[in-house]
Image: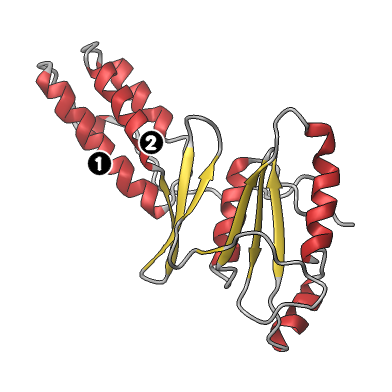
Amino acid sequence: MSTRYVCASWQGLLQQLVYLIGRGYFFYHVTYLPVNKKEKYSQIDAKLIGKYKTDKTKWQRSRLKAKGVANFYYLRWKHVAVILHTLGEQEDEIIYDDKFLDIRKNPLLLKISELVAFNIQIVDRRVTVKLAKDTYEGLRIELHQVAKTKSKEKMAKAFDRINGFPAWAGIIVQKRRLAWYLCEQAKKHNIQLDQSELRFVDQRKPVKVFQE
């Protein structure tokens, strides 16, 4: 069985999800494996891969698509596992008993940690990524607090940490709002901070998706 389903990083998982959704894998099921049972992850992987017949080559997938049969795809990063599938009829041997949602109607919420989560969604027929509401609000609170220090250096460093998130279009829009918010908060403390003084990354570098 191929291991090209284990992602090397959460950034790689996010990148591959966007890629697959953009190619018609509209239906998703997200599950979070118990963090205290890492030794069983390989067994769980094998069970889900067998259940949904995801261990297929590119050519096998192409043939299924040509026949109007749904393709399934399995991805995992650490404890976060995602099953996706395309439109089409299902193979008889597939046991379809998990709840799948349609990303065209329901954005995919991907929780990376207690503090970080993303929404993957389709807007104007394009797949994009945004920081989830709680993650965005957490960053806003952090900027609100750092503005109280009246230190431009600390404010710039706090904002620069946000550049650690991949620069997807939706996140870039949110970063612009956060930059404006930080400058407004600085002004309330009699500090003139211009957005041009903040490092702003708006180019995303592709990352390696799968582990070696």
Q: Nearer the viewer, mark 1 or mark 2?
A: 2
Q: Residue at x 19, y 29 (%)?
A: 183
Image x and y of residue 126, in percent: 43, 67
**Number of residues whose C-alpha sits closer than 10 Å to that of mark 1, classed few (under 14), some (14–19) or many (20 or more):** few
Residue type at numbered disc 2:
Asp
Question: Residue at the location (45% across, 57% down)?
Answer: 107
Give residue 82's position: percent from left, percent from top: 65, 53
In the depicted structure, whether residue 177 falls above or below residue 14: above
Image quarter of residue 80: top right
| Three-letter residue code for mark 1 | Arg
Reply above or below: 167 against 193: below
Q: Residue at x 80, y 66 (%)?
A: 53
31 vs 159, nearest the viewer: 31
How far is mark 1 from mark 2, CA to CA? 15 Å
Ranked by sequence position, the earlier of labels 1 and 2 is: 2
Q: Secondary structure at mark 2?
A: helix
Residue 11: % across, % down: 58, 44
Seen in the picture, residue 66 relative to 194 is either above or below; the reply is: below
**185 relative position to 53: left or right:** left
Residue 108 vs residue 173, the one in the foreground: 108
Q: Say which residue appears at 78% left-offset and 33% top-offset.
A: 38
Disc 2: CA contacts within 10 A as few (<14), some (14-19) or many (>=20): some
Question: Residue 186, image x and y in percent?
Answer: 17, 22
Disc 2: which residue: 134
Quarter of the picture holding the C terminus: top right
Circle 1 SS class: helix
On the rendered image, what quadrant is the N terminus found in? bottom right
As drawn, which residue projects farthest toward the front?
A: 97
Q: How many marks?
A: 2
Residue with the mark numbered 1: 177
